[in-house]
Amino acid sequence: MSYYAENRKARFNYEILEKYEAGIEFLGVEVKSVRGGQMSLEGAFVIIRGGEAFLINANIPPYQAKNTPKDYDPLRNRKLLLTKKEIAELAGSEKNKSLTVVPLSVYNRSRKIKVEIALVKGKKKYDKRESIKKRDTDREIRREYKGL
């Protein structure tokens, strides 16, 4: 399993409550671009409308700029392939204003491109400081063990 894109800021800015795996509906020109690692999840999020889930603001630049259609939009909304049960769970939790759904990573699973999405809650400033402090202490501990 190889990762094509990762949303590192989401793991820092949000507390992850639940994770889901979904397929993405791509155009043909987008698949090569994603497999080439050109996809960006920065600022992307998921919305539920009309019983369907959509990935919003995920940037997939054209693989070959001169070969792509003139009306290609790299920031277009892409449909996510989830079960009805998962969509109902996400829609129910999306009504809570403090929760949101964000993509965490895009990877392949047996020749299929999947996206890992998560139901998240925003961290407060002091929570972020605790994350930074924990990361720094873990780094120092690894250095100590490496030196032995």
Image (cartoon, rainbow, N blue to C red):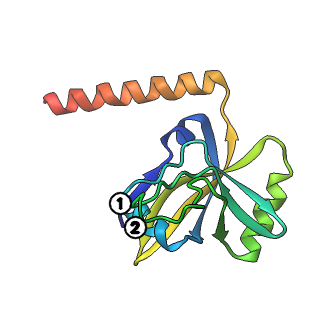
Quote the CA–CA distance across marks 1 and 2: 6 Å
Instruction: Give the image location of residue 15, x and y in percent.
Output: 63, 41
Residue beneath disc 2: 32
Q: Residue at x 81, y 70 (%)?
A: 51
Up the image or down, 18 lies above or below 85; here it is above
Q: Badge 2 local density, few (<14 within 10 Å), some, or many (20+)?
A: some
In which quadrant of the rendered image does the N terminus lie? bottom left
Instruction: Give the image location of residue 67, x and y in percent.
Output: 42, 65
Identify the image quadrant of residue 125.
top right
Residue beneath disc 1: 36
Instruction: Give the image location of residue 80, x and y in percent.
Output: 65, 68
Instruction: Give the image location of residue 98, x and y in percent.
Output: 79, 40
Q: Residue at x 39, y 59 (%)?
A: 3
Q: Residue at x 54, y 25 (%)?
A: 130
With 19 as the anchor, is 97 left or right in this view? right
Identify the image quadrant of residue 122.
top right
Count of numbered marks: 2
Nearest the camera: 91 or 112?
Answer: 112
In which quadrant of the rendered image does the C terminus lie? top left
